């Protein structure tokens, strides 16, 4: 069998986005819309997801399923990853904080959508691998740091958007503090047993409003000792 070319991979990415759109339609009552944002769809079609998973799993990269990346972690199902970024609504001038880099896939998608991406990863091996992949692919508006993401990245605050890819009972106080009034924070909220993907919006008086979107299952947000 011939090896897949970029043409073949582009077809798989288009199909992946079509499946994400199908999920949006089926879950439209929970999400509040029936289609993935066009800019997010374009970004997901542009980013080579197969390069952000372990090489033995590259052939599965465009399936609508989470994939293991090591250290008992996964890269999210494309539908859930796309939904989180859609809810975040990153704009071209925005500065975005991501907590939980993994191997860098969602940071790459965000890179296509916003001006500056700052991403923090507690697993040193992930952070190093993600930084290498992102640099090699030319995502130069992404900065990666190893550390406790619950502390945010105060040197670059305030952020217009904050994305957290692990679950906690509530948004960490430092992340709320570093979110600009009028900004959005998206994360799974709950315990190991019950979690909901939740959108938070910060009012001008710094209070938070929240909206639960749908049940999800993520790993627990880790704090670096």
Image (cartoon, helix red, strand yellow):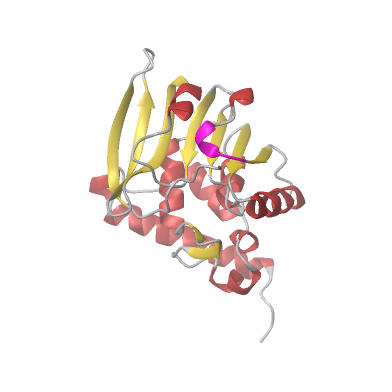
Query: The C terminus is located in which quarter?
Result: top right
Left or right, 188 with respect to 107, comes to left
Q: Going by the picture, which residue comes out furthest to the front?
A: 225
- Main SS category, magenta section: helix
Frontmost residue, 166 versus 81: 166
Q: Going by the picture, which residue comes out furthest to the top?
A: 205
Q: Residue at x 60, y 51 (%)?
A: 123
Q: What number of labels is visible?
A: 0
Residue 138 within the segment the image draws in magenta: no
The picture places residue 133, in percent across and down from the top left corner, at 71, 54
Q: Going by the picture, which residue comes out furthest to the bottom?
A: 1
Q: Write down the quadrant of residue 199 in the picture.
A: top left
Q: Residue at x 37, y 48 (%)?
A: 35
The picture places residue 44, in percent across and down from the top left corner, at 54, 52
Query: The N terminus is located in which quarter?
Result: bottom right
Residue 123 visible in this rendered orientation of the protein: yes
Frontmost residue, 76 versus 123: 123
Q: Residue at x 30, y 54 (%)?
A: 25
The picture places residue 62, in percent across and down from the top left corner, at 52, 65
Frontmost residue, 77 versus 222: 222
Q: Going by the picture, which residue comes out furthest to the right?
A: 136
Frontmost residue, 115 versus 197: 197
The picture places residue 82, in percent across and down from the top left corner, at 45, 50
Residue 90 visible in this rendered orientation of the protein: no
**Region rendered in magenta:** 147-151
């Amino acid at each position: 069998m011939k090896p897949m070319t970029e043409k073949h991979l582009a077809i798989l990415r288009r199909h992946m986005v079509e499946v994400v759109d199908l999920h949006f339609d089926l879950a439209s009552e929970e999400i509040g819309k029936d289609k993935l944002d066009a800019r997010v769809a374009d970004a997901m079609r542009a980013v080579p997801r197969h390069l952000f998973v372990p090489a033995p799993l590259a052939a599965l990269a465009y399936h609508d399923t989470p994939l293991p990346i090591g250290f008992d972690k996964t890269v999210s199902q494309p539908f859930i990853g796309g939904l989180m970024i859609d809810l975040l609504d990153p704009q071209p001038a925005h500065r975005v904080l991501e907590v939980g880099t993994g191997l860098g896939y969602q940071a790459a998608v965000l890179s296509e959508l916003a001006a500056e991406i700052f991403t923090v990863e507690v697993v040193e091996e992930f952070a190093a691998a993600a930084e290498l992949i992102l640099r090699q692919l030319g995502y130069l508006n992404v900065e990666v740091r190893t550390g406790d993401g619950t502390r945010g990245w105060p040197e670059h605050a305030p952020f217009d958007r904050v994305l957290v890819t692990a679950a906690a009972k509530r948004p960490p106080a430092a992340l709320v503090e570093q979110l600009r009034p009028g900004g959005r924070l998206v994360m799974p909220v709950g315990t190991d047993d019950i979690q909901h993907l939740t959108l938070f919006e910060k009012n001008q008086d710094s209070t938070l409003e929240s909206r639960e979107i749908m049940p999800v299952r993520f790993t627990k947000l880790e704090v670096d000792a």
